[in-house]
Amino acid sequence: MDVYLLQEVVCGDGRGDQLHELAESLSFEWTARVIAESRPDEVEEEGVAILSRVPLRDVAVWPLPPSHPPRHRLEATVDSVDASLRIVTLHAAVSADEGRDAQIAGLASPTAAPLLVGSDLNAPPAVVRPLLGADFVDTLGWDATPTWPVDEAEFVQAWRDKLGEQPDGVEPRRLDYLLVRGLRVDASGTVVLGDGRRHASDHRLVWADISISQR
């Protein structure tokens, strides 16, 4: 099976629907989405989403611990021949002051196993790992190599174009994770997506080949 766990998926404001466009280009039939951040002052909607080649069932949305703007966790189950897998995606708040750490720590609460979490946690492994204890294995082995930004100059220009101001400090960091519980990681890594002229995302994509069996 092939499953994508996506953050910062945009639709509206005349920009099309990124989730539907990606699903169509990959010929994936199953999608789920929730608006991750409630921003009444913006026309576009930004969400987290699941894109799957195989059916999604038991889709659920849960509020994360309070932050501003409020954020949500999206879950679903996919089935293989031998087992079922619960999958989760979220986009944590940008800093500890805004509630990020409580949102990360809450990941340790779901009891489902096997479990796969794909997230932009807005925090490096030195912060994430202690918050989760021994509940999860990081598919990248808690490597702190930055996953954001892919291209600092490109990110700064895009920020200026959209908001008309300079971003507050762009420090390369590891923000993106595939975390597993009750699974075996056969291979993993990161990759930069783009067409040679412009990058598809300011984050590196984290990927893993996973077996649904006890690790």
Image (cartoon, grey):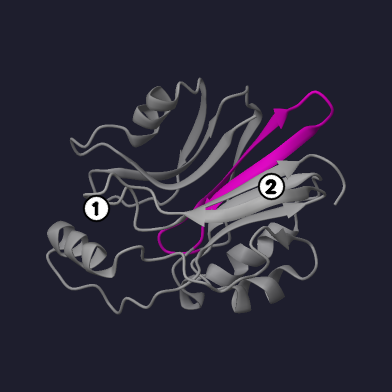
Residue type highlighted by circle 2 = Leu
Mark earlier in primary sequence (1, 2): 1
> In the structure shown, which secondary structural element does the residue marked by tag 1 occupy?
loop
Q: Position of residue 22 (x, y in %)?
A: 39, 31
Residue 10 falls left or right of residue 33: left
Residue occupying image coordinates x 59% and y 63%: 103
10 Å crowding of disc 2: few (<14), some (14-19), many (20+): many
Residue occupying image coordinates x 77% and y 71%: 133
Residue 41's label in the rendered image is: 1
Q: Where does the magenta region start and end? A: 67-92
Q: Position of residue 19 (x, y in %)?
A: 39, 33
Q: Is residue 58 depicted above or below 6 in this figure? A: above
Residue type highlighted by circle 1 = Asp
Residue occupying image coordinates x 82% and y 49%: 182
Does the segment drawn in magenta span residue 82?
A: yes
Residue 116's label in the rendered image is: 2
Work out whether residue 14 or residue 157 is closer to the camera in this orientation and state it. 157
> In the structure shown, which secondary structural element does the residue marked by tag 2 occupy?
strand
- The residues tagged by marks 1 and 2 sit, at their Cα atoms, a distance apart of 33 Å
- Give yes or no for contact between labels 1 and 2 (Cβ–Cβ under 8 Å): no
What kind of secondary structure does the magenta stretch mostly adopt? strand
Query: Depth-wise, is mark 1 or mark 2 nearer the camera?
Result: 2
Work out which residue is located at the far front of the displayed protein and give it.
Answer: 196
